[in-house]
Image: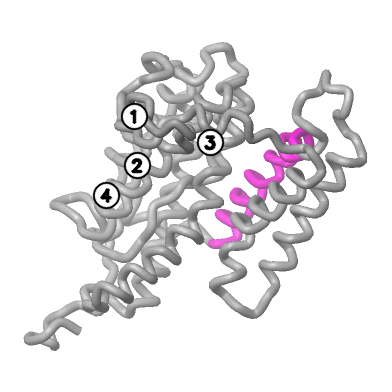
């Protein structure tokens, strides 16, 4: 607790010191990193982006996730739950974004749908915060499960090699590597150490890549082509395209995401033993919707090339 006024200081405002704060913050980053980079990797592959462009998507997600986490934790008037809530990237929107992507407008169509749906979510946040507790867990659970099942075709294509016209598509090597990566995730998620199980996705990606490199299935030749630093630049992939059907589809996903966010806010409030009312939930939902809009409108642009002769890495 902070010194003085112990009785008036909220539990979430406890001061841990620089060392503990950095250690716990690093743990949060490592835990959420795998989930954040997975979505832009899926979207970049589906959109036919090259490695550098996919890197821009990943950098954008990481950058905005960091800013929105600060907004959610610190809070300003009407925005932020003022709870230690880390803002990441939701998998709930992936299936819908892939459908919009195939509709013909490409990434600008996806960006336009997410921005417009996020704006609608921003408007209804106070109302939603009051009625969301009427949704029974069994309903939201089925919705989230269905979202995961719709991603199975994407995962299957990636596991087989992604490129259908490739001669090694569906080869034993590809399927074995995919199986090994899945086995690592399952094994690590079942260990008794919570901090390790939460890193299961990230560690599986690293170990799977190491195995792929050992068998000549990974190409690192273009790593040095990226720049070290990047600054946000809006609409690098083109101005957003606003299609009514896409916006309505994405708005349904936004409702699901708002339900997830509300559940997270309530759960974190119970963990730190602090009061969470509808007003605080509404502030958290507004921060989430604002970060959703920002994440789709800002993409880091490359900085000038590094002077290092050995090349730079992202």
Q: Quadrant of residue 1?
A: bottom left
| First in sequence: mark 1 vs mark 4 | 4
The tag on residue 298 is: 1
User: For residue 64, which numbered disc appears in the image?
Assistant: 2
**How far is mark 3 from mark 4, CA to CA?**
30 Å
Q: Residue extending furthest left?
A: 4
* Alpha carbon distance from label 3 to label 1: 14 Å
Q: Are marks 2 and 1 in contact (CB under 8 Å)?
A: yes
The extreme right residue here reads 172
The numbered dot on residue 126 is 4
Q: Residues within 10 Å of mark 4 (few under 14, many from 20)?
A: many
- Is 147 included in the stretch rendered in magenta? yes
Q: How many residues crowd around disc 3 within 10 Å: few (fewer than 14), some, or many (20 or more)?
A: many
Residue occupying the far top of the picture: 104
Q: Give the residue pinned by disc 3.
A: 40
Q: Residue at x 57, y 22 (%)?
A: 49
Mark closest to the chain's N terminus, 3 or 1? 3
Q: Front-most of 130 and 170?
A: 170
What segment is highlighted magenta in the picture? 137-158
Give how far across and how far down residue 50 sits, in percent: 58, 22
Sequence-earlier tag: 4 or 2: 2
Question: Which of the two discs, 1 and 4, sits closer to the camera?
Answer: 1
In primary-sequence order, the first of circles 3 and 4 is 3
């Amino acid at each position: 607790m902070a010194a003085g006024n112990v009785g008036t200081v909220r539990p979430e405002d406890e001061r841990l010191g620089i060392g503990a704060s950095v250690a716990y913050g690093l743990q949060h980053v490592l835990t959420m990193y795998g989930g954040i980079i997975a979505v832009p990797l899926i979207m970049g592959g589906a959109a036919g982006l090259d490695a550098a462009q996919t890197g821009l998507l990943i950098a954008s997600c990481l950058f905005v996730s960091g800013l929105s986490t600060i907004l959610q934790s610190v809070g300003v008037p009407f925005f932020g739950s003022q709870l230690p809530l880390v803002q990441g990237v939701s998998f709930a929107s992936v299936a819908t974004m892939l459908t919009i992507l195939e509709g013909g407008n490409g990434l600008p169509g996806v960006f336009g749908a997410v921005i417009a749906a996020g704006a609608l979510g921003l408007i209804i946040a106070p109302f939603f915060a009051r009625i969301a507790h009427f949704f029974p867990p069994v309903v939201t659970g089925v919705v989230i499960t269905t979202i995961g099942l719709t991603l199975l075709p994407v995962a299957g294509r990636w596991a087989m090699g992604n490129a259908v016209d490739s001669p090694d598509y569906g080869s034993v090597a590809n399927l074995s590597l995919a199986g090994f990566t899945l086995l690592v995730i399952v094994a690590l998620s079942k260990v008794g150490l919570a901090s390790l199980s939460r890193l299961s996705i990230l560690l599986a990606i690293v170990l799977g890549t190491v195995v792929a490199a050992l068998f000549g299935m990974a190409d690192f030749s273009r790593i040095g082509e990226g720049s070290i630093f990047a600054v946000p630049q809006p609409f690098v992939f083109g101005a957003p395209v606003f299609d009514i059907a896409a916006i309505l589809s994405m708005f349904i996903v936004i409702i699901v995401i708002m339900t997830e966010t509300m559940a997270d806010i309530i759960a974190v409030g119970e963990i730190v033993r602090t009061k969470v009312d509808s007003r605080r939930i509404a502030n958290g939902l507004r921060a989430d919707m604002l970060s959703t809009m920002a994440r789709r409108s800002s993409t880091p642009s490359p900085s000038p090339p590094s002077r290092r002769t050995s090349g730079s890495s992202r």
